[in-house]
Amino acid sequence: MQGLIEEVSAATADCPSSPAKEHFSDRGEDEVIHEETTASHPPSPDTAGSATDSLIRSLMEELSAAKEEIARLTKERAYFKRKAEWCTIEDQRILSPVITSTDHWQERTWLLLHEPIRSALLDFEELVASPSFDPVQYPWKVTNFFYFFNTAFAPYVRRHHQVEQKIYIPWVAGKTEIPDEVRGGYDGIEELIQEVEASEAEYKSLERAIRKGKIPPASVETSVVRSDTSAPSTLGPLSQGHEDIKAKNREKAPDEEGGPASAPASLPATSLASAPAPSPKNTPLSSRSLYDWRRRLIARLDRLSHHLIVHMDQEESFFPPAVLRYFSQHEEERILEQMSSASAAHLELPMVLLAMDVWGSPETKAAFLKKLSRAARYTLNTYWLSSYKKSVARSLESLALQEPPPTVYLPHMSVNQLLVAAPVFLLCTIS
């Protein structure tokens, strides 16, 4: 009997222990039961597919929302993309067809003064000549355009011409003779500015008459626009300047094989005067009169743009070589200090700096700011620049929108800002 027990014990010792039992002893009975139940009943395919479909739908909705946002931003800011096309191969967006770089000090002076004007004219071509500038559907765009024109553009051009005639031209005329075509043109430009300003009064008069139902049918059908034989007939002045810039870049930029760059597709021959207008065929007579007013406004802006660009091109062709020949950089800097005035700096400096962000390098901008007095730099950074961006610049940018902006445009500088900045203005004048 004892021998039988020993044989059974030996056989049991030789047999390996069961893995399931080892697993059971280590993890406990409840865990093993849960594991076996899960293995015997895997998740339903319908449940897994439903979760996947829900995730895909969520991702598709997010993608669709992102596409809509991109489309909206692209549509509203399309003219900024158009601006970026007019850049040199150095990626400095110089709009002037005469001055091609910022390498020379005598040329940087005229970029500093003229590029704000050229930038505004480009915005007029992109925004006011656009079919979305509709005085019937978007009357708020008319208000915002004239806010920018009356608050910033016209005062800047007038101030620029005033200091040129009183200070800069007599300074250069003391050493060399200035051609008549460079001296002239100021009176004609002023008349064209006044014509554009008169368009605002015409619009308000039409609007009041429409509200009262007093639009005479005869005045609606007549749309008289003064013709100007000196204006280009096929290309608008800005478009012609853009073609010059593209031709300049084609000559400077080599293609991949080292030869001259291939000419890109030419731009459509458009101008402010030939810009598409909303069709007035099936509109009331009152609305048709507003569309006629829009065409007159665009024609006036077209003539103003043409005369300004011709005038600036002539100055940029004559003054830099003359100043380089007869004067030093230090002498010109002293004249520019006389031309600057604290009374107009709150408008001029923001316009110059915003344009410099486009055409100039960071080093160019830093050098310009360094020449200002410490008081002027403080006032510019604290009051002038932020106020200009929030009111004047935004009023022009809003013309690219399809809905009125949520903010109400205030005067460029509030009374409190003027009172706080008055002592600084005095310091700027003294320094």
Image (cartoon, rainbow, N blue to C red):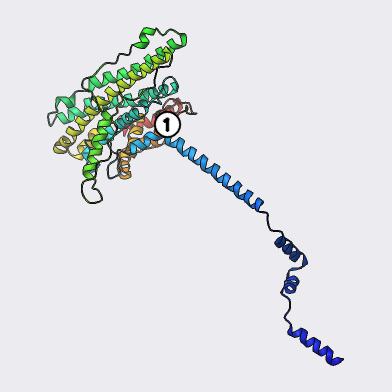
Residue 356 occupies quadrant? top left
Question: Could you say where residue 380 lies in the image, as x and y percent from the top left?
Answer: 38, 35
User: Does any portion of residue 342 appear in the rendered image?
Assistant: no
In the picture, the quarter occupied by the C terminus is: top left
Q: Nearer the viewer, residue 306 or 20?
A: 20
Residue 161 occupies quadrant? top left
User: Does any portion of residue 136 appear in the rendered image?
Assistant: yes
Q: Nearer the viewer, residue 115 or 382?
A: 115
Q: Amino acid at mark 1?
A: Ser
Furthest toward the right, the residue is: 1
Residue 398 occupies quadrant? top left
Question: Could you say where residue 183 lies in the image, as x and y percent from the top left?
Answer: 18, 25
Give neighbour class at mark 1: few <14, some 14-19, many 20+ (Cα, 10 Å).
many
Label 1's element?
helix
Residue under the image location 36 percent in, 19 percent down? 294
Q: Nearer the viewer, residue 10 or 82?
A: 10
Q: Is residue 335 left or right of residue 178?
A: right
Above or below, 2 relative to 199: below
Question: Could you say where residue 119 lies in the image, as x and y percent from the top left?
Answer: 32, 32
Question: Could you say where residue 430 lies in the image, as x and y percent from the top left?
Answer: 32, 32
Above or below, 265 relative to 223: below
In the picture, the quarter occupied by the N terminus is: bottom right
Count the marks: how many? Answer: 1
Residue position for label 1? 387
